[in-house]
Image (spheres, grey):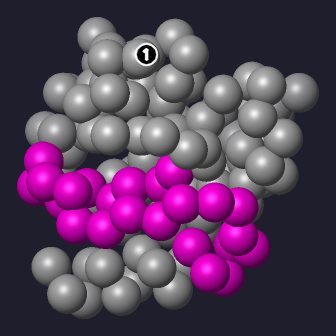
């Protein structure tokens, strides 16, 4: 069960809200592509929520359920989950696939932003 803090830390994005929440965001957006049935996705969830809380104001964290939003998953070539993509200015600037600890994701975010 998500607490109130978690729901504020992570934005659940759908096909209808994708453009406004991700592509038109003023801040970079770290998007977690996941599904209910995916065990590794459930392991990644708490790390993604912690990143959302710790980087609040500098980075937006979003989750996309690939089963409910297949057109987004297809558009970005999501073939395995969890896939996490970093967007800045509406463009993909980095992508990482598979479950990893929070520190690994933070390093990925920092290095991707440094290169962009």
Instruction: Tell me if residue 11 comes above or below residue 87 in the rendering.
Output: above
Q: Seen in the image, is 90 located left or right of residue 39?
A: left
The residue tagged 1 is 69
Q: Seen in the image, is 57 located left or right of residue 93?
A: right
Magenta region: which residues? 83-105
The verdict on residue 29 being magenta is no
Instruction: Tell me if residue 99 comes above or below residue 70 in the rendering.
Output: below
Q: Seen in the image, is 15 located left or right of residue 24?
A: right
- Residue lying at the far front in this picture: please name it: 79
Q: Seen in the image, is 86 located left or right of residue 40?
A: left
Most foreground residue, 20 or 43: 43
Most foreground residue, 115 or 1: 115
The verdict on residue 104 being magenta is yes
Q: Which quadrant would the C terminus be assigned to in this image? A: bottom left
Instruction: Tell me if residue 106 comes above or below residue 51 in the rendering.
Output: below
Q: Please tell me whether mark 1 sits on a helix, a strand or a loop.
A: loop
Instruction: Identify the residue at horizontal 42%, vertical 25% (top origin).
Output: 13
Residue 112 is drawn in which quadrant?
A: bottom left
Binning the other alpha carbons within 10 Å of mark 1 as few (below 14), some (14 to 19) or many (20 upward) gives some
Whether residue 36 is visible, yes or no, is yes
Residue 61, percent from left and from top: 47, 49
Residue 27, percent from left and from top: 24, 57
């Amino acid at each position: 069960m998500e607490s109130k803090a978690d729901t504020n830390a992570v934005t659940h994005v759908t096909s209808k809200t994708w453009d406004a929440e991700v592509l038109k965001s003023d801040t970079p957006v770290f998007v977690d592509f996941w599904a209910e049935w995916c065990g590794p996705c459930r392991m990644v969830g708490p790390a993604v929520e912690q990143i959302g809380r710790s980087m609040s104001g500098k980075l937006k964290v979003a989750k996309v359920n690939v089963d409910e939003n297949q057109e987004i998953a297809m558009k970005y070539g999501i073939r395995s989950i969890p896939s996490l993509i970093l967007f800045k200015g509406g463009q993909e600037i980095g992508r990482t696939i598979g479950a990893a600890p929070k520190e690994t994701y933070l390093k990925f975010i920092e290095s991707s932003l440094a290169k962009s």
